[in-house]
Image: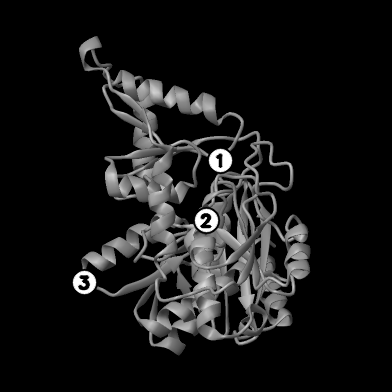
Amino acid sequence: GRDTRTSGPALSRAIIAGLLATGCDVVDLGVLPTPAVQYLVREHFDAGAVITASHNPPEYNGVKIIEGDGTEMDDTQTICLEGHLFAEEFILAGWESMGTLSAAPEMIHEYITAVAGYWKDIDADGMTVVADPGSGPACESTPQVLTKMGCHVVTINGMMDGTFPGRMPEPSPEGLQPLSELVRNTSAAFGVAHDGDADRAVFVDETGEYLEENEQFALVERFICSKTPGIVVTPVSTSFLAERIAEETGSVVDYTRVGSISVARRMIALAEEGKTVVFGGEGNGGLILPGNQHCRDGAMTAATMVALLKSSGKTLSELRTTLPPHVMLKDKIHTDSPHELLKNAKTAFSGDTLDLTDGVRINRQGMWALLRPSGTEPFMRLYVEAETEKEAEAFRDEITRVISP
């Protein structure tokens, strides 16, 4: 499968040719969201490949490899695969063993039906929702999911276009101003927007205000865990709202390294141990409902928001006021020696509770901070969260002063 990027057809055909040449049978699903490919791989195929650059600008493209269980291939296996490719360590099939190619664009309807039917006891009953697929592969699927649930759906940026004329693939508060305006003009319950491959979803409330992704995580967590308490899996970069809601609902948080693959694999491993894993995901709009599948799914997140609002009888703006107070700051520290800064942090804050799952997380009463090297650029990411802006800024200043004097 692939997203709508202009380089998608060329890359798709190249991958298909390579797979056929090694004797694999290939099914081309066409243009569809990454989680749709993941769902269909899990249900029907041995593996999959999605041609997408997700939230990156239009000129980028890449390949996500999907394992047979529907999860993304992890970093270790991906590096191993790249090694084989660059070393040309592969065996081509003979003429009598070439793979076969078939097209099955209609299979996306199986995914749409599964997502729309997940909250089968919820009747959206004419709820108006504005969907902004961002000219990406969810232009047809997300509106269909919401319509099947009973919603009246209005779309913006709803035509597939790999030049992304309306906004960039990364949904930002600034880029979603037209969505906010349309929500207000249509008296919609909320607006939902996807990134470039629709594995994430972000929201604006009925007033057009952007819902910060960690608040989104917390509201859905409360909705899920109030029904079935259990384990919530999320990276160490997620807001302390996750822990507050877990305590409120009799649940617990299990922290992982940053990245949806780490979250998904941890959820699966805990479930195999017989643990009750009810929810997971990241504080970036990438939510995982294990009853659906173990991957981020933007359409599933949109459907869950419909169920949440219908069940609560409250507006989204009302619900967000019920969350505990919090302020999160995100900064970058430019450095050529990130490991030296991490070492300094461990020494300087040894009196605090440290979590070394991914970088250095410093935990204090009512606040925390995470220092983590960027995977692609020469800087450190610094996340700081506290109950007030004054506390968050003071903690941030203390950290930057100590580790990089």
Residue to which mark 1 is pinned: 53
Residue 279 at x, y percent in the picture: 40, 71
**Near-viewer residue (205 or 261):** 205
Could you classify mark 2 by the number of other residues whose Cα lies within 10 Å: few (under 14), some (14-19), or many (20 or more)?
some
Q: Nearer the viewer, residue 180 or 285?
A: 180
Q: Give residue 263's quadrant in the image.
A: bottom left
The amino acid beneath tag 3 is Gly
Q: CA distance from mark 1 to mark 3?
A: 35 Å
Label 1 CA crowd tier, 10 Å (few <14, some 14–19, many 20+):
many
Among the two numbered marks 1 and 3 on one chain, the one whose residue lies closer to the N terminus:
1
Q: Residue at 73% of width from left, 72% of height from top?
A: 187
- N-terminal of the pair, mark 3 or mark 2, is 2
**Mark 3 falls on what kind of element?**
loop
Residue drawn at x 27%, y 62% as measured from the top left: 269
Please state which of residues 61 and 388 is positioned toward the viewer in this rendering. 61
Task: Tell me whether circle 2 and circle 1 mark residues in contact (CB < 8 Å).
Answer: no
Quarter of the image holding residue 399?
bottom right
- Depth check, mark 2 against mark 1: the one in front is 2
In x, y percent, where is residue 318?
Answer: 65, 85
As drawn, the label of residue 274 is: 3
- Quadrant location, the N terminus: top left
On the rendered structure, is 248 left or right of 319? Answer: left
Other residues around mark 3 within 10 Å, as few (<14) / some (14–19) / many (≥20): few
- Looking at the picture, which amino acid does disc 2 mark? Gln
Residue 144 bears which disc, if any? 2
Residue 183 placement: quadrant: bottom right
Q: Earlier in the sequence, mark 2 or mark 1?
A: 1
